[in-house]
Image (cartoon, rainbow, N blue to C red):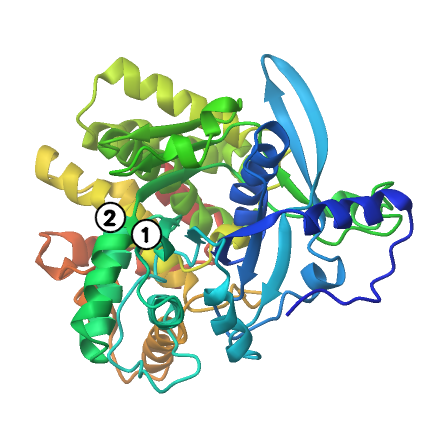
Amino acid sequence: MRFDKDWPTVNPRIDKVLQNREKRSDKILQFGGGNFLRGYFDWMIQVLNEQTDFNGNIVVVKPTKRGDYEDLRLQHGLYHTTINGIKDGVLISERQLIDCISKVVHPYLAWEDFLLTAEISSIQYIVSNTTESGIKFSSADLVSQNPPHEFPAKVTRWLHHRFMFFEGAKEKGCIFLPCELIEDNGLVLQECILQYIASWNLGSDFQNWVKSNNVFCNTLVDRIVPGFPEDRRGEIYEDFGIVDQLEVSVEPYHIFVIQSPLDLNVKLPFGETDLNVVFTDDMTKYRQLKVRILNGLHTSMVPVGYLMGINEVRETIDDTVIGNFLDELLYEEILPSLDYPKDFLKSYANDILDRFRNPYIHHRLISIALNSISKFRTRVLPSLLSYHKVKKKLPNRIVFVLASYIWFYRGKTESDIIPLNDSQEVIDLFSNLWRAYHTQDIQLNQLVETVLSDEQLWEFDLMTIKGLPMLIQKYLQSFIDNDYSNGSVKKVAINM
């Protein structure tokens, strides 16, 4: 859908911004319009437009059924990013108007409009951020569904429509830049699309066109994007003359690592800007460090901090008890599981903690908790397995985090409901297990065994790790015997 024609523009600058946007071409189809992409990739495209001749707009697609990006539509795709933090040793706070989103399309409300975007000749790039659980194949998706459920299924339908409309023209293939935090995200997405092509019998010509004329890049993204600065909600900004409901607060640091068989710097002239974009033929080092240290620590702090009554990342790091627990988890369990020079790892970890302590960033733990089980699997579980392999013993603090997640997914604290945000299957699994435990239909050891042996959750049978089930059960029993935030549970966390 295009933006409402009667949207109230209240000053000449906005009218000029919208007129200038109309002169640019739609070059990017973006699945997702949440805080991260708006404060990261879309901000980069804004810089690219301002500093180079890229001259491109973004068409945003709502990848899931829930919500409709109403605020984004009402604001005509306009919003601000505010960079808050330390840059070159100086505290900064810089606000920028982002005007590169030209359309918003909701496949669940307007399927034909979604397919029509495949007919836009100028689109060259497909960008996505559908979380770690978003890139997968499902045999339940049918070619007759409008739309099918999974993100790769929607992309397959879109590509097939484009293939048919442009009669297989080679130059109408696209470059994929998925931002999901999974290893080889571009190749995984390509494989899912090829699975749908085979499952739906879409033909060898289309299959060959996808393989030969579309480029699937592996990427790595990194920037802390906590979202709307709640303490400034209600401000009226000069750019709009109205309240900006979509302002995104971000840290100065950012990096975008792209592994591609093409020289994309010609098409995407990031090199002409001061953006931190790296083109490489091997991103192993970049990915492992970022996922295991930054994302791993983020994911580890969520259940421990939240269940202790803490709301934000910086508060968690600064808390005497939990901060010490996380320091030890980081330096004694995560870093020893990585095969890099110790001084290098320590320096990298110190920089991460400095970013977490940014006084301008209010990153809520509950925001990070989205799809926490798949995040634990990709971000933290590798450290547990590597540590166990190298040290021949369990990393107690990481195991404590895993037990805390099993407790967290009860969906409640002693005094409140936890707003779990995960797939319904995952939420139902834990809900049913805890209900069965409380009605005495199963014992605690059976609950633990069911969770740890579920290869749908972990892609691995965790019951095979010697000592892990007993240690998880021990920690869960301590949570059952005491309020999680009780001092006795804190004592467990700090005396490992």
Where residue 236 appears, as percent x and y from the top left, is 87, 46
**Image vertical order of residue 443 relative to residue 335, above or below:** below
The numbered mark, 1 or 2, whose residue comes first in the sequence reads 1
- Residue 351 is marked as none
Residue ID at (61%, 38%): 46
Which quarter of the figure has residue 267? top left
Q: Quadrant of the C terminus?
A: top left
Residue ID at (59%, 40%): 55
Classify residue 394 as left or right of residue 378.
left
From the viewer's side, name the closer residue of 438 and 77.
77
Classify residue 443 as left or right of residue 460.
right
Check disc 1: other Cα within 10 Å, few if <14, some if 14-19, many if 20+: many
Residue identifier under label 1: 376
Residue 426 visible to an observer of this rendering: yes
Residue type for callout 1: Phe
Q: Considering the numbered disc 2 on the image, is that residue within a helix, a strand or a loop? A: helix
Residue ID at (36%, 62%): 134
Residue 473 visible to an observer of this rendering: no
Which quarter of the figure has residue 165? bottom left
**Image vertical order of residue 7 relative to residue 81, above or below:** below
Residue type for callout 2: Leu
Q: Considering the numbered disc 1 on the image, is that residue within a helix, a strand or a loop? A: helix
The reply to whether dot 1 and dot 2 touch (C-beta < 8 Å) is yes
- Residue 381 is marked as 2
